[in-house]
Every structure is written in C-alpha cells, then in structure tokens.
Image: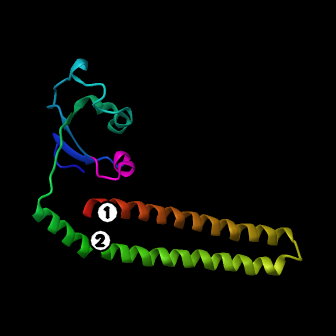
Amino acid sequence: MVTGSLREPLVDPTRTIPAGKVNIGAFCTYAEGYKAENEMIDYQAIPLNKTQDFGVHYKKYYPLEASFFKSSLDKRLLEHLWNRYCYINIVKKCRLLADQINHVVNKLQQAKRHLGRTSFRPLLEQDRKQDDILAKAVKDSTETAIEVINSFMSQLIKQRLFN
C-alpha cells in the first residue's frame, strides 16, 4: 500500500498468517540524497526476505515502531462493517465455489461415462482422450481445492480481526 514517498505502512502476510493476527509494520525512507551509513542500519531490522522485496533500495529504508488500539467505537464500527460487507462476500464465494465443485463433478462423471464405453475396447486414441479428460478434471479440482484453502485462511484471518 503506497501512501507517500517517505513513510509506508504495510501488513506482512508472511508473519500474519502463521501468527493468526495481523502483523502491521512501518518503514520510513531516508530523505532523497541521504546516504545511510552501514553502522546505522540494524542487521535484524530488515529480514533477508524483505531485502529481496525491497531490491537494491533496501538500504534506503529503516523501520518505525508501529502501534494501534481499538476503542469501543472502533469495535462497533468494525462489527458493523463485518456484518454488512464480509458476510456478502462469503456468500458470493460460497456460490462460486459450489459452481466450481459442480463443474469438477460433471467432468468426473463425463470421464466415468467415457471410461465405461471404452473399457473393453482399449484403443490408443480413446485412451489419450480419457487421460486428457481426467487430467482436466484433476487440474480443475486442484485449483478448486487451493481456492477453498485460501478462502478458509482468509476467513480465519477475518475472524481474528473482527471477533
């Protein structure tokens, strides 16, 4: 999320997902033309994987302390937003996932019907067609499973955030 040229807040998904809570960090850039001395940069301040994210500019950033709080008004507002928007997205995702699962089931049924017709006549061309149908069904089911897992993880994160 880019908000300005000198200060950038960020949510670290690598630390957020395993921790089960949102990990918010903040980094600030040195002024244009300022060259940071190597001694000033704390070795642990920017993890190695983040230096790869920042690229050659990783020495232009330094970490800021970030803190936040949630008042009772914030809590009510977040609950309202959750009930109003997040539930709708969950229902939409459920419909989409149900459609994707039905699509995979239809492909598997098609493969089963095709297998029933060719099980006693193993022709090379029909075998390839059968393999192709099954490969497509496997690919679709894998993509659907990944989407279900991602939806589940995002649901867990939302519950931790809003409950």
Q: Which residue is mark 2?
A: 86
Q: Which of 65/139 is in front?
A: 65
Q: Which of 100/155 is in front?
A: 155
Residue at horizontal 68 percent and vertical 79 percent from the top? 109
Question: Is 96 situated above or below 35?
Answer: below
- For the residue labelled by badge 2, is the local secondary structure a helix, a strand or a loop? helix
The image quadrant of residue 107 is bottom right
Check whether the beta carbons of the residues at disc 1 and disc 2 lie within 8 A of each other: yes
- Residues rendered magenta in the picture: 14-23
Q: Nearer the viewer, mark 1 or mark 2?
A: 1
Q: Position of residue 151 (x, y in %)?
A: 42, 65
Coloration mode: rainbow
Q: Count how many numbered circles sit on residues in the image.
A: 2
Q: Position of residue 128 (x, y in %)?
A: 77, 67
Does the magenta segment cover residue 21?
yes
> Magenta: predominant secondary structure element?
helix
Name the mark on residue 158.
1
Residue at horizontal 43 percent and vertical 75 percent from the top? 94
Circle 1 Cα neighbour tier, 10 Å, few/some/many (<14 / 14–19 / ≥20): some
Q: Which of 79/148 is in front?
A: 79
Residue at horizontal 31 percent and vertical 63 percent from the top? 158
Q: Amino acid at mark 1?
A: Lys
> Would residue 118 appear left or right of 17 to someone viewing this image?
right
Residue at horizontal 25 percent and vertical 74 percent from the top? 83
Q: Position of residue 14 (x, y in %)?
A: 38, 46
> Would residue 50 appear left or right of 36 to someone viewing this image?
right
Circle 2 Cα neighbour tier, 10 Å, few/some/many (<14 / 14–19 / ≥20): some
Q: Amino acid at mark 2?
A: Cys
The image quadrant of residue 36 is top left
The image quadrant of residue 28 is top left
Q: Position of residue 51 (x, y in %)?
A: 34, 33
- For the residue labelled by badge 1, is the local secondary structure a helix, a strand or a loop? helix
